Amino acid sequence: MTDYGISVLSLICMESFVALSTYLLLITGQVSFGQQAYFGIGAYVGSSLTALAGFDLTFAILAGALVAGVVAAGVGALTFRLGGLYFAIATLAFAELIRLVWVNINYQVEVDGFMVGPKGSEGFRDIRYLLDNDISSNQYLWIIVLWLALVIAFFIVLERSRLGLAIRMVENDETAAASVGISPTRHKIMAAAMAGAIAAIGGVLFAHFMTFIDPRNFGVMLGVHSLAYAMIGGMGTFIGPLIGVGIDIGLLESLRIFSGYRMIVFGSLVAAILIFRPRGLLDEKTVHRISMRVRQALGNNRKSTRAVTDDPG
Amino acid sequence: MTRAEPQDMLSAVAVTKAFGAHLALDNLSLAVTKGGVIGLIGPNGSGKTTLFNAITGIHSPTSGSLHFAGRDITGRASERIAQLGIARTFQNLKVFRRLTVFDNVLGAQNSASDMTMWQMLFSVRRNETPRRDRVEHILERVGLTDRRHALAQDLPLGEQRRLELARALAREPELLLLDEPAGGMTPQETDTMAELIHDVAEAGPTVFLIEHKMGMVMRLCRHIVVLNFGRKIAEGTPKQVQSDAAVREAYLGSVARHA
C-alpha cells in the first residue's frame, strides 16, 4: 500500500472514533457538537503519558479513555436536563472551553536532552512513540484498526442488548421510557461517559500518528463533521456513521475530485440528505427492512432444519 | 379530610396542582381500593389526566400527598414510581415509534429495571427465551401477534392504543392507569378494548380508567369517581353516579344537552 493510502485509511479510522462517539449520543437523543473535546483530552493525556512519562501506548489509550469518560460523565450530569438545542449549545461551549485549556497549557519536561510537552498554541511536539519503538505506519494502521474493531464489537453487543434497547427507548420518548421504569438520566449520563471514552481512544491514536498536535486539531469543525457523519450515514445502526466517514474522507477528500470545493460538495450533501432522508441513509426504517429480509431468509432456512434443531425462535 | 388508609392501593390526600393561576387539581382527595376497574370521569379539563400525571411523577403536585401501597410517592421520579408497580398508558399515544412492536413490549419488562447497566449490556435480546415467550403471550392477549415485527409508527391508532396496553402489561403492574384507551376508536374496536380491559382486571392488576365512552365505563367499573374543575363532585357505583344530581348537572347533563 502507498504511504498516501495508509495515511488516508488511518485518518478514516481515527475519525470514525469521533463519529461513533457522536452517534452514541444521538441514539440516546442528544445532539452533541462537542465530542472533539474528548478526542482532545485523549490526545493530550495519552501523549503526556507516553512522551513525558514513558508509559506504554496501550496504557496511554486506556488511561486517556478513562479520564475522558469521567469528564464526560461529569459534563453529562450537569447538562442532561437541557433539551435539544440547549444541550447542543452546552456541548459546543464546553468543547471550546477545553480547546482554550490546550491553548493555555504550558508544561515541558526534559526528555533525552529535549524539552517535550504541551506548549500553548504552538502545540505538543515530538510525540516520538512510534519512532522510538520502531513502529511503521503500516503496523500502526493495524493497531488503529484493532482498536476500532474493539469499539465496533462494543456497538454490536450494545445494539443487541437490553441496554441498547433502553437507550433507544429514551431517544424515542423519555416520558414513556420513564413510565416503564427506565431512568432517562442514568442512561444519558452513561451514554455520555462511554461516548467520551470512545472519542478519547481515537484522540490518543491520532496524536501518536501525527507526532505533534496543536489546539487547532480539536476545533469545532471536527465536532460538526462527526455529527454530519452520523446524519449522512444514518441513525439506525453504527454502520451509518462509518459510511459517513467513508463518504467524506474516503471519497471527497482523498480522491481529490473536488479539490478546493470539497466543503461545498460536503455541505450540499449534508443539506440534501437532511431534506430527503432526515435520519440518514441507513435510518431506522431501512435497517428494520433489511433485518426483516435477513430474518426471512434465515427463517426459511430454519424451517427446513427445525426438526433437527427444534429452535423456538 | 381523608387520610391515607393502609388498605387503600392508591390514595390522594388534599392534592392540588396549580399551573400558574389555574388549579388543575383543587384539594382533591380520593382512594382506590384493590381489585377490579375503577372509573375516573369528568368533563374535558376537569383534571383527570393531570391526576394521572401526578400519580406517575410526571408533574409533582403543588401541595398534598400521594400514596401507593403504603408508600408516599409524592414527587418521586417517574421511573421509581413505575418500579414500585404502577404502569400507565397515555391519552396522546407515546409508543416508541421507531422500535418494533415486539421491542416496545420487551423493553418494558419488569426485569429491565432490576438489572444493572452491565447486566443489561450483556443480556443479549435474542437469548432470553422465557422473557421473549412472555412478550409473545402478551402480544397474543392484545391481538398484535401478527404485527410484532412492524415498527410502532406504522400501526394505525387503534393498534397503537393496544400496543400501549401491551407495554403496560409487560410491567406486570399492581395498578394500571389507562388514559382513554378507547379514544378515537370505532365502536367495534371499543368493544374489543372493553373486553380486553375486563379480562386484564380479572387476571390481576387493579385498573384505574379514564374514559369518555360512558357505555364502556358503566359496564366495566365497580366504582366511579367524578371530577369537575379539579374537585371530586361525586363517587360511587355506576348506578349511584348516574343518578347523582351534581353529576347530571356538571357532566352527563351537559353531554345530553350537547348531544
Image (cartoon, coloured by chain):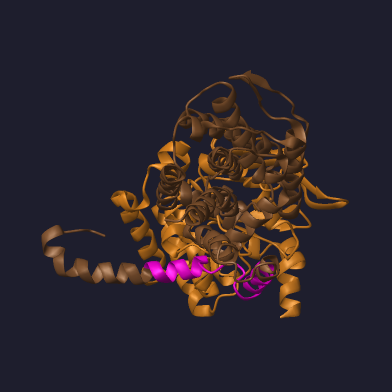
Outermost residue, right side: B21
Question: Is residue A127 part of the magenta span, yes or no?
Answer: no
| Picture coordinates of residue A85, whole percent (x, y) | 74, 54
Q: Nearer the viewer, residue A180 or A183?
A: A183
Q: Colour of chain A?
A: brown
Q: Quadrant of the C terminus of chain B?
A: bottom right
Look at the image and tell me whether residue B74 can be seen: no
Q: Residue at x 47, y 70 (%)?
A: A286
Instruction: Please provide percent x and percent y for residue B234.
Output: 69, 55
Q: Give whichever of B223, B150 is nearer the camera.
A: B150
Which secondary structure class fits the magenta region best?
helix
The quadrant holding residue A233 is bottom right
* Residue at screen point 32% across, 67% down: A295
Q: Is residue A158 left or right of residue B54?
A: left
Compared to residue A282, the image places residue A142 above or below, namely: above
In the image, which lettered chain appears orange?
B
Q: Magenta residues, as a range?
A: A266-291
Give yes or no for residue A268 being in the magenta stretch: yes
User: Where's the N terminus of chain B, which quadrant?
Assistant: top right
The image position of residue A30, as x and y in percent, is 64, 51
**Vertical relation: B206 (above or below) B219:** above
User: Is residue A4 at least partly visible in the picture?
Assistant: yes
Relative height, residue A295 to residue B39 (above, below): below
